[in-house]
Image: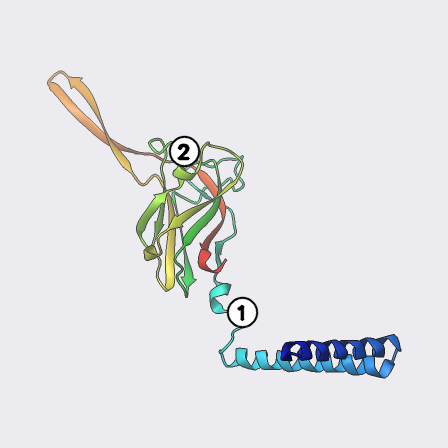
Amino acid sequence: MSRITMDYNKMQNHFIKIKKLLNKNDKNSIILICTIIILICTIIGTFIGLLSFFGIFPIISEDYKESVIMIDRDYHHIGDVNRSFFAKPETEGVEYSNTFILNHLGDKMFISISAQHVDPDLDKSPIYIYLNDQFVDYLNNYYDEESIEFKTIEIEVDNSYFHRGQNKISIISAEEKFKVQDYYTLENGSIIYEYYISNIDDICFKDLKILNMDYI
């Protein structure tokens, strides 16, 4: 008889004995088995807890805690006109800026934002996104139509835009100024009157956050 067969027979005999004990409703045996199981679970839990305490086996890593970095949940309105149909009617000016802390940089980083009334026409009303004073993208590129409904979008950003530690994000409307020339003819000749106009658009947004996809 092979050793594998012998081991199988021994295992089968053990199961038969346990089954007989259970069939006999041997309360003492059941209590003993439950006690052994609880004791084993307690020992394993204590061991894992000790490893976590010494940093050998963290139960919840610091990286995982940084999977979603919420920057701002509140409503914000940038632009130059108060709009009664916005979630926040009063404008805060043409620029929004905020700071956040990053301890870990993933290979895939995203900006997530929910906005309303974003015009997809860049020539008409560009909305600029900056990270640490570096231009990232136009918010307009992620909206197909100008809608009063909030739409959440995600913008993939190379991790070189981020720093470990404090970071700054800015959303700006009407950064560009355009020179306009008006010609007036007077009795003594022509003069040129120059002035500047800005492309200013009003948008409302909320739930601004950073997604670190390495830990999601």
Front residue of this view, candidates 63 and 184 = 63
Toward which corner of the image does residue 199 lie, by quadrant?
Answer: top left
Front residue of this view, candidates 121 and 158 = 158
Classify 191 as above or below 93: above
Q: Residues within 10 Å of mark 2 (few under 14, many from 20)?
A: some
The furthest residue to the front: 1
Toward which corner of the image does residue 25 lie, by quadrant?
Answer: bottom right
* Left/right of residue 80 with respect to residue 116 in the rendered view: left
Q: Which mark is residue 60?
A: 1
Give the mark nearest the N terminus, 1 or 2: 1
Q: Amino acid at mark 2?
A: Pro
What is the count of numbered marks?
A: 2
Front residue of this view, candidates 18 and 60 = 18
Residue drawn at x 53%, y 80% as measured from the top left: 51
Residue 77 percent coordinates (x, y): 46, 43
Q: Amino acid at mark 1?
A: Ile
Q: Secondary structure at mark 2?
A: loop
Residue drawn at x 52%, y 38% as measured from the top left: 86
State the residue position of label 2. Answer: 120
The answer to whether the residues at label 1 and label 2 have Cβ atoms under 8 Å apart is no
Residue 122 percent coordinates (x, y): 35, 34
Q: Secondary structure at mark 1?
A: loop
Q: Residues within 10 Å of mark 1 (few under 14, many from 20)?
A: few
Residue 103 percent coordinates (x, y): 41, 66
Residue drawn at x 37%, y 51% as measured from the top left: 157
